[in-house]
Structures are given as C-alpha cells and as structure tokens.
Amino acid sequence: MTYPLVHIEFPTQDTKKSLKWYADVLGWETSFDEKMNYGMLRTGADQVGGGINPLDAAHFSAGAIPYVSSDDIPALLKKVTASGGTVLMEETPIPTMGTLAMFTDPDGNRIGVINFPAQGA
C-alpha cells in the first residue's frame, strides 16, 4: 500500500503575502480563510494541495521541502529571485534522473524543482 502526497503545509509569518508569492511564482490557485487566518493552495486539478500556516515569530521555522516540476528551471529561478526568494542550488544534472535545483520562498521555506527528461530521450 502506498500513501500519496495529498497536502503540503508551509509555515509563514505573513499568510496573505505568502499566498500572493505562491500564486505569482508557481501559478497555484489560492484562497484565504479570514476567520482562521489560514491560506489554502491548489496546484491544479487532481494534484497535491496545501496550506499556509501562520506562525508567530517565536514559533516560526522553515519546514517541508516539496518538489515541483518545471520544463524550464532557469526561468523559474529568475522568477524566484525577482520575487524575493533565494536560489540555494542552481540547476544541477542528476545522472539517470534529470536536473534539479533548490530555492527558498521569502519566508525561508525550501522548495525543490526537478525536470525529468522525456521518456526514451
């Protein structure tokens, strides 16, 4: 039995700012629950969703490392830095796998990005 990834939650100090960042940089759909000060993320139909969990400065720490797919990692990394994120690892070839990179959002959450070559290429 496998347990598919169905939700990723990111800690943040500014929920609305984080929601805007994820929508602008990764194109994810976002919504905000005023009552709970909680943000919701949807990466696409039938895809993994997630949340933005507001934490105060005393309890804040960067957490999960999800991986996203991209056919153009350099373009994504440019968007990341232009939007206040930081590139931790430039696009790097991984033999027999593809290429990957790692960056942070403005709150320091680490995110990986991977490009798998087309099957049979």
Image (tube, rainbow, N blue to C red):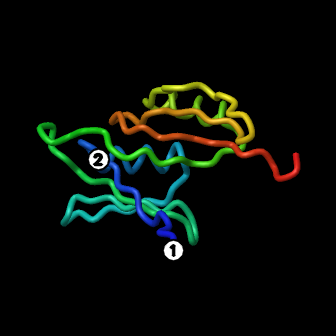
Question: Which mark is drawn over residue 11?
Answer: 2
| Mark 2 vs 1, N-terminal side | 1
- Check the image and report above or below for 110 versus 5: above
- From the top left corner, tell me how far across and down residue 86 is, in percent: 46, 27
Q: Between marks 2 and 1, how big is the CA–CA gap?
A: 29 Å
Q: Secondary structure at mark 1?
A: loop
Tell me what residue is drawn at x 47 percent, y 48 percent: 66
State how many labels appear.
2
Q: Nearer the viewer, residue 103 or 118?
A: 118
Tell me what residue is drawn at x 31 percent, y 50 percent: 16
- From the top left corner, tell me how far across and down residue 18 is, in percent: 36, 45
Question: Which mark is drawn over residue 55?
Answer: none
Tell me what residue is drawn at x 69 percent, y 43 percent: 115
Q: Nearer the viewer, residue 114 or 11?
A: 114
Q: Nearer the viewer, residue 16 or 60?
A: 60
Dot 2 crowding, Cα within 10 Å, few <14, some 14–19, many 20+: many
Residue 41 sits in quarter: bottom left
- From the top left corner, tell me how far across and down residue 93 is, in percent: 69, 30
> Which residue position is annotated with label 1?
1
Q: Nearer the viewer, residue 115 or 16?
A: 115
Tell me what residue is drawn at x 52 percent, y 43 percent: 25
Residue 58 sits in quarter: top left
